[in-house]
Amino acid sequence: MKVPVNEPVIADGAKKYVLDALETGWISSAGKYISLFEETFAAFIDVKHAITVTSGTSALHLALTSLNIGKGDEVILPDFTMIACLDAVLYTGATPVFVDVDPETYCIDTDQIASKITDRTKAIMPVHIYGHSADMDPILVLAEKHNLYVIEDAAEVHGGTYKGKKCGGIGTVGCFSFYGNKIITTGEGGMLVTNNKELYEKAQILRDHGMSLSKKYWHDLVGFNYRMTNMQAAIGCAQMEKVDGILKTKRNIGSMYNKFFSGHKSLILPKSDNFSKHIYWMYPVIFNLRGKDNNKIRDDIADLLKLFKIDSRPFFFPIHIMPPYYENCSLPVSEKLSLTGIVLPSYVGITNNEIKKICNIILNRISELS
Ligand SMILES: *Cc1c(COP(=O)(O)O)cnc(C)c1O
């Protein structure tokens, strides 16, 4: 594809730092880049503690297990999200409870959470989708009232804010991914952040086979190997030097799309709410042509873009309709988004002309169909 949806930014320092890790022999999960990456990232999110892990999925799993969530417990999460959230809950033996999403933010509909809380609920897992934060205040109020943990999935929102606070640093614990298409990447990798010291220590122990922090080879718990390598952390350190620039570029990309698409009623554009500054990790658009099959239009336009070598992605499927997670229920917003939403390129190198071209292709097609 000539215009990818996303593409990693290889920061200048990456080569130097990785080479340093290689030349000094610190290629495994000890080394200076691990602690530097953790400290830099903790400061970036404005939290006390950060722990590098192998992926966003392992960050979520480690967060859940560190909070003692397991069999018999329930975790409330949105039906519209990347599948890792659900897998992480299922790995622990806990039961996922699906909630529909807000039609404007695509994040969990906070008005629908209270009715899903039971005696077995242990945590709420809001997911900040495509770069827009979930509405955290009502979630925090419910969590306080019912004594629940809040596990933020911030894998798509590094540096995004909710009412001025960095996403991931608001709940009990925040989980990030550094997969190749995320705002910053280490190839594969993840980070768990928290202000809770006890949770931080427990997560450190569980990340490293459950080994005691003070007594080598003594295990009080059954843990995992979720350690990131120093080479990945070296890339992460270089990326952190670029993150402000990346975020600025992403916001410009979002503004350009907003400008070219503005005033077209048959498109629903991403909301940059007054509580959330959208960072446009990806640029999501919903087709909303009156009286038309918007699912077909979405798929046709994706094919049309492909002819111009422009990549795009359909929205996620609703979790509850897929075989391993199937539940016979109706979550209409999630279902509708999934059928009619497309994600447009927001790779850092995209030019204004490319954005203009994408918008023109879509707008021309829509006017033909209207
Ligand atoms: C990417 C992503 C994850 C999973 O991260 P991996 O590093 O691929 O394991 C989890 N949640 C969301 C919302 C994501 O976008």
Image (tube, grey):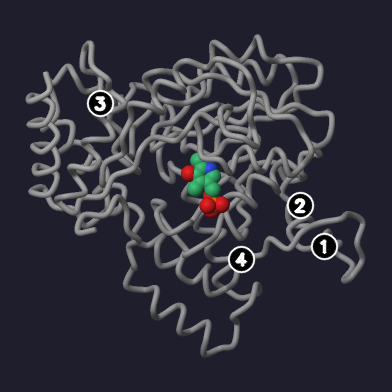
Q: Residues within 10 Å of mark 3 (few under 14, many from 20)?
A: some
Query: Which of marks 3 and 2 precedes in the sequence?
Result: 2
Task: Please provide percent x and percent y for residue 157.
Answer: 43, 41
* Viewer-nearest of discs 4 and 2: 4
Please, is residue 107 above or below residue 301 in the view?
A: above
At label 2, which amino acid type do we have?
A: Glu
Task: Please provide percent x and percent y for residue 347.
Answer: 27, 52
Query: Which of marks 4 and 3 precedes in the sequence?
Result: 4
Residue bearing the label numbered 3: 269
Q: Give how far apart the Cα atoms at labels 2 and 3 are.
A: 42 Å
Residue bearing the label numbered 1: 213
Residue bearing the label numbered 4: 228
Q: Give how far apart the Cα atoms at labels 4 and 2 are.
A: 17 Å
Q: Residues within 10 Å of mark 2 (few under 14, many from 20)?
A: some
Q: Residue at x 36, y 55 (%)?
A: 243
* Viewer-nearest of discs 2 and 3: 3
**Quadrant assignment for the N terminus:** bottom left
Is residue 350 shown to the viewer in this render?
yes
Q: Are marks 4 and 1 in contact (CB under 8 Å)?
A: no
Query: Which of marks 1 and 4 precedes in the sequence?
Result: 1
Task: Please provide percent x and percent y for residue 47.
Answer: 57, 44
Residue bearing the label numbered 2: 201
Q: Give how far apart the Cα atoms at labels 2 and 1 are.
A: 8 Å
